[in-house]
Image (tube, grey):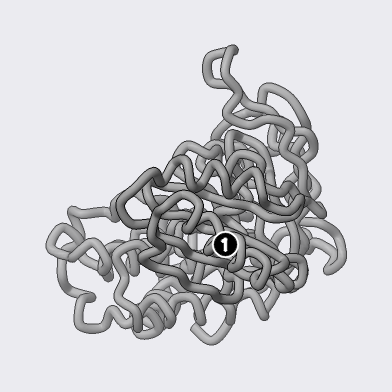
Amino acid sequence: MTGRLASTAQATPAQAPVLEVKDLHHSYDGKREALQGVSFTIRRGEVFGLLGKNGAGKSTLIKVMTTLLRPTQGSLRVLGMDPARDGQRIRRRIGVVQQGESFDFTTVQGNLDIYGILWGIPKEERERRRDALIQRFGLEDLRKRRSFDLSGGQKRRVQVAREFMHDMDILFLDEPTVGLDVIMRRSLLDSIRGEVSRGLTVVFTTHNLEEADYLCDRIAVIDGGKILVLDSLENLKRLYGGKRTMEITLGAGDAPGYFQALKTRLGPTDSLTVEDRSGILLTDEPKHALSLLVELSQKQAIQIEWLNIRKNTLEDVFLHSVEPGGQTHADP
């Protein structure tokens, strides 16, 4: 398949948002909210990354955006349409790759054929797309094998490949590279990039921060049903670029007392995350922080077994955002 065919539905103007979320709330039991006032927009041809811990609200948000759940409060428009009235029309213009299984009763080739039939693609066009996708996703040696006999990573490749059997405007990918080896993971991400260059919009959830850095235009960090950070990768790196990350591991002694004393001496823009005997410190002044670490080590009579100073990564942004007292930064 050399390119994504134009959608038969009405095209969305290049500058118009394809997805608008405003003050979205959702509760499963009427008591605890899985989503709490989520707002953002996604533009055509953008890769929008959703990062968050398990239980942060990512899956609920994806289900709402793909019309599987109706929000308890707030508004949502997908491709200019209201899911409450136009759910069926929306579902024909989106693709969704979730963490379910393939059609295990048939072959890889059969998986793609069935999906094409479900979407009403004529036989000649269906076979053309099927064969192109089998080649493109490295499935040629597997095409006659039943999905039941495939490894987890191979099944994942089939799941992603079959979604491209039909035309779509937005593709929702929920952890699409789980189980893939390094080479196939990069190949898949490059394929997604190619489709984005032809106008496809992608909403991408992942726990792999390197993937998010490689693929996404903007990142939203969600935790407790709230958006904590939302900005372009460029702006996030600029925001945190002046800081340094200091990784500290302590030896025998009163580690909680050491880290508590450290917290009371940090600057207003510094951030400390502690787990057992290790800490991660984000600071604007690494030289001053280093002197402070050594001073407290002597006062508390506890040895620093490991100390590393490095530039910040996207992982540091994520960890800093989801920790209590972390920085909130949103630019929807």
Residue 292 picture location, percent across and down: 61, 60
Kind of residue sitting beneath label 1: Asp
Residue appearing at x 15%, y 58% in the figure: 148
Q: Which residue is mark 1?
A: 316
Residue 297 picture location, percent across and down: 47, 57
Quadrant hosting residue 160: bottom left
Residue appearing at x 20%, y 61% in the figure: 147
82 with respect to 128 (left or right): right
Q: Nearer the viewer, residue 270 or 50?
A: 270
277 with respect to 321 (left or right): left
Q: Nearer the viewer, residue 54 or 146?
A: 54
Image label count: 1
Quadrant hosting residue 156: bottom left
Mark 1 is surrounded, within 10 Å at the Cα level, by few (under 14), some (14 to 19) or many (20 or more) other residues, namely some
Residue appearing at x 71%, y 68% in the figure: 285
Residue 130 picture location, percent across and down: 38, 75
Q: Is residue 167 above or below residue 228?
A: below
- Residue furthest toward the left? 149
128 with respect to 153 (left or right): right
